Amino acid sequence: SRPMWKPYMSGANVPVELLDLAVGCDLAFVDGHVDTRPECVNAMFERNVSVIVAHDFECNVYGWGRIVIPNGYNRMLIDSFVNGGYVTTAIFYKSDKLNFK
């Protein structure tokens, strides 16, 4: 319903390298397979995405340590209490685009 927005979605069978983001992308939500979430975040950095959201950041099984945050990006962690436990959402954002002060 918004002509200036174009959603992209990749399923588990489509490698992130095949996403056609040549026109740019402002926001990416990473909720992929256990083995690929860090690589998806890194791929969004390479594509110059302004805001990248990744959830389940509290779970080390995803290999979050493989994320390489480039210069010009910040990371903000948000903890939420859900169903009797804490979950963490990571938001990576370009410091020249957003200001969360």
Image: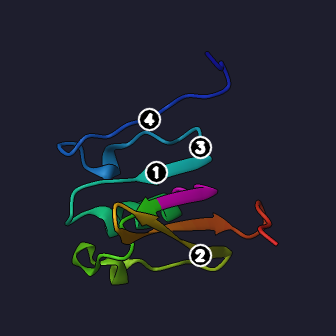
**Mark 4 packing: few (<14 Cα in 10 Å), some, or many (20+)?**
few
Mark 3 or mark 1: which is in front? 1
Q: Quadrant of the N terminus?
A: top right
Sequence-wise, the earlier of marks 1 and 2 is: 1
**Relative to 50, is 72 above or below?**
below
**Mark 3 packing: few (<14 Cα in 10 Å), some, or many (20+)?**
few
Give the percent coordinates (x, y) of residue 93.
Answer: 64, 65
Q: Which residues are magenta?
A: 47-53
Sequence-wise, the earlier of marks 4 and 1 is: 4
* In-front residue for pair 49/27: 27
**Mark 2 packing: few (<14 Cα in 10 Å), some, or many (20+)?**
some
| Cα distance in 3D space between marks 3 and 1 | 15 Å
Give the percent coordinates (x, y) of residue 38.
Answer: 34, 69
Element at label 1: strand
Query: Which label was assigned to residue 75?
Result: 2
- Residue bearing the label numbered 1: 29
Mark 2 or mark 4: which is in front? 2
Residue, x 17% and y 43% (percent of image)?
13
Give the percent coordinates (x, y) of residue 66.
Answer: 34, 80
Whether residue 48 can be seen here: no
- Residue bearing the label numbered 3: 24
Residue type, mark 1 in image = Phe
**Relative to 77, is 35 above or below?**
above
